Image (cartoon, grey):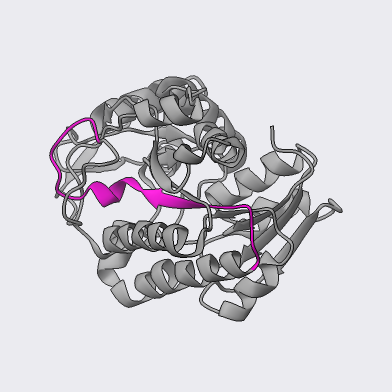
């Protein structure tokens, strides 16, 4: 386990970032959270504000001076700050590029100058683009299908160049459809699981894009925390300066997903079983099927996912029922 280290978590008030903050604080680390609250929420980090080992710094990764300020004396950087969502990037590619590319470069440069031990960053399964091969293997990608996908691929290219040119250790984690506690169900760009859960709790019909046969490798948040820690711990130099799929290695259709959600939520309210499901048009930029090979992470990091989909969904449903009622 990582203990007694100074860890910077960018986007620390967001969904994944706040979960990382809580986990590493509980392991006796000093945690610095950098967030501009564009998509993060203060209530996600409220429990940590009284912890003497936690520091919140409001700042923006698009400002290089903010990045330099927060990386001073840091052992590890867990870079989670980004503007997610394929539709958001299609609606506003300029801002997505500013945050995800310029902001990423600022953080990478600041981390290099601060001589951090390792820079671990959130990459994305969207990098696989139009590649039709399944499962997705890290070394085989296609052409990007959205501005968001371009920005996340550029992150990988910058990380690779910086590791080769400046010697900074980097590891990219290609997240596959992460879900779990603290994930925001509100807004136009809400992820599918919290959005559907909220609608079902309110006895509203969820709308599936397309016929519901698109499939995803849905990944519970605790698996993502596990991968971040393994990326920090690994000492084998052949395992760094590369990217890893962060997933379960299994895929579920959207139709199956809604079935499971209705099943688990109906334990709280039987009426949820009778909520109808609607279907809309396929979404521009969506990949039809996503399934990760996790063999590389197993081999080089010792990764074994702690949670499969159904276990993670049940945990998430319980959390949302307590927090959304």
Rendered-image quadrant of the C terminus: top right
Q: Is 324 part of what is drawn in magenta?
A: no
- Asked whether, in this view, residue 164 is left or right of residue 113, the answer is left
- Closer to us: 310 or 194: 310
Image coords of residue 37 (percent x, y) = 58, 67
- Asked whether, in this view, residue 19 is left or right of residue 314, the answer is right
In the image, what residue occupies the spot 58% across and 34% down?
319
Asked which quadrant contains residue 238, the reply is: top left
Q: Is residue 265 visible?
A: no
Q: Is residue 164 visible?
A: yes
Q: Which residues are magenta?
A: 114-136
In the image, what residue occupies the spot 71% across and 67% down?
72
In the image, what residue occupies the spot 28% across and 50% down?
126
Q: Is residue 127 above or below residue 221?
A: below
- Asked whether, in this view, residue 314 is left or right of residue 156, the answer is right
- Closer to us: 219 or 191: 219
Image coords of residue 222 (percent x, y) = 55, 32
């Amino acid at each position: 386990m990582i203990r007694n280290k100074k860890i910077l978590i960018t986007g620390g008030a967001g969904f994944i970032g706040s979960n990382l903050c809580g986990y590493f604080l509980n392991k006796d680390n000093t945690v610095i959270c950098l967030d501009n609250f564009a998509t993060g929420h203060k209530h996600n980090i409220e429990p940590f504000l009284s912890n003497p080992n936690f520091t919140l710094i409001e700042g923006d990764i698009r400002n290089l001076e903010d990045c330099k300020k927060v990386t001073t004396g840091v052992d590890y950087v867990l870079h989670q700050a980004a503007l997610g969502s394929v539709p958001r990037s299609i609606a506003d590619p300029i801002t997505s590029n500013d945050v995800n590319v310029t902001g990423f470069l600022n953080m990478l440069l600041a981390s290099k100058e601060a001589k951090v031990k390792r820079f671990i960053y959130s990459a994305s399964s969207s990098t696989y683009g139009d590649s039709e091969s399944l499962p997705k293997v890290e070394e085989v990608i296609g052409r990007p299908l959205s501005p968001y996908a371009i920005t996340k691929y550029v992150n990988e290219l910058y990380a690779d160049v910086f590791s080769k040119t400046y010697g900074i250790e980097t590891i990219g984690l290609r997240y596959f459809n992460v879900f779990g506690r603290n994930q925001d169900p509100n807004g136009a760009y809400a992820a599918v699981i919290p959005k559907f859960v909220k609608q079902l709790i309110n006895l509203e019909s969820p709308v599936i894009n397309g016929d519901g046969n698109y499939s995803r490798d849905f990944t519970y948040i605790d698996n993502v925390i596990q991968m971040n820690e393994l990326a920090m711990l690994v000492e084998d130099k052949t395992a760094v300066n590369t990217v890893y799929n962060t997933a379960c290695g299994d895929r579920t259709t959207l139709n199956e997903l809604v079935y499971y959600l209705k099943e688990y939520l109906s334990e709280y309210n039987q009426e949820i079983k009778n909520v109808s499901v609607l279907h809309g048009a396929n979404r521009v930029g969506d990949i039809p099927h996503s399934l990760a090979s996790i063999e590389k992470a197993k081999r080089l990091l010792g990764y074994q996912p702690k949670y499969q989909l159904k276990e993670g969904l049940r945990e998430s449903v319980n959390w949302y029922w307590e927090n959304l009622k």
